[in-house]
Image: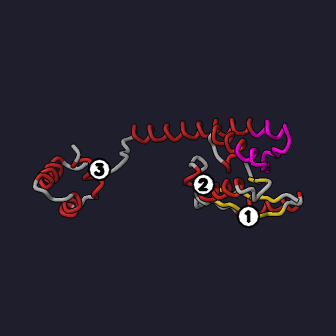
Amino acid sequence: MKRAGLYVRCSTDQQTVENQIRILTEVAERAGWTIVRVFEDQAISGAKGRDQRPGYDALLKAIHRREIDICAAYAVDRLGRSLSDLVAFLSDIQARGCDLYLHQQSVDTSTPSGRMLFQMLAVFSEFERELIRGRVRAGIARARAKGAVFGRPSLSPDRVARVEKALRDGLSIRAVAKMITVEEDRLESVAHV
């Protein structure tokens, strides 16, 4: 009987992983797998690295300790969106004797065709991410063209002069920030000019 680790992820707080867990649990029961653990990342983008995805990190550690024989995820984009990261993930888990099951794409990497299909899906997932990135850039450009301003407002020349004088007079950045009610990190740039 295979020991399964279920990996579930959603990108926003408005989404839930409940359906992913339910579906993968049903798959595990039909396949006769024993679910060792559900690894979850709630409201975390698939584009984030391992260090920013605690559930994904815990999954990889469990695979390295050989605690699971198969990793099951709802879809390839739940694991990640970078082709190189997905291919590295597959190579890494297979080197440790762990297979991968992707429900939505019906991929089972215990077969040669499943491994090939996984790599093809990884390519499409990265392509989708690039499309999303392009749409976001276009939206920002459109908003800027309509006059939208991004970031914090600049300090007025008068305030910059007051900050520079206070710093020359020996006040700390924290003291100057309190004096003119501006966040310290904004004064860092003035202090280093």
Q: Does label 2 or label 3 sit earlier along the sequence? A: 2
Residue 30 percent location from the top left of the image: 89, 59
Q: Does label 1 or label 2 sit earlier along the sequence? A: 2
Q: Does the magenta stretch include residue 108?
A: yes
**Is mark 3 in CB contact (under 8 Å) with mark 1?**
no
Three-letter code, disc 2: Ser
- Front in this rendered view, residue 27 or 61: 61
Helix, strand or loop at mark 1: strand
Give residue 153's mark.
3
Q: Nearer the viewer, mark 1 or mark 2?
A: 1
Q: How is the image coloured?
A: secondary structure
Q: Mark 1 Cα within 10 Å, few/some/many (few <14, many 20+)?
A: some
The residue where tag 2 is placed is 11
User: Image point 70% across, 58% down: which residue?
Assistant: 62
Q: Nearer the viewer, mark 2 or mark 3?
A: 2
The residue where tag 1 is placed is 37
User: Image point 23% across, 46% down: which residue?
Assistant: 192
Real-space CA distance between mark 1 and mark 2, rounded to the nearest whole angstrom: 21 Å
Residue 121 percent location from the top left of the image: 73, 39
User: Image point 59% across, 51% down: which residue?
Assistant: 50
Helix, strand or loop at mark 2: loop
The segment highlighted magenta reads: 92-118
Looking at the rendering, in which quadrant would you find the N terminus? bottom right
Residue 84 percent location from the top left of the image: 64, 37
Three-letter code, disc 3: Pro
Looking at the rendering, in which quadrant would you find the C terminus? top left
Helix, strand or loop at mark 3: loop
Residue 5 percent location from the top left of the image: 75, 58
Three-letter code, disc 1: Arg
- Front in this rendered view, residue 177 or 143: 177
Q: Is residue 89 left or right of residue 165?
A: right
Q: Does label 3 or label 1 sit earlier along the sequence? A: 1
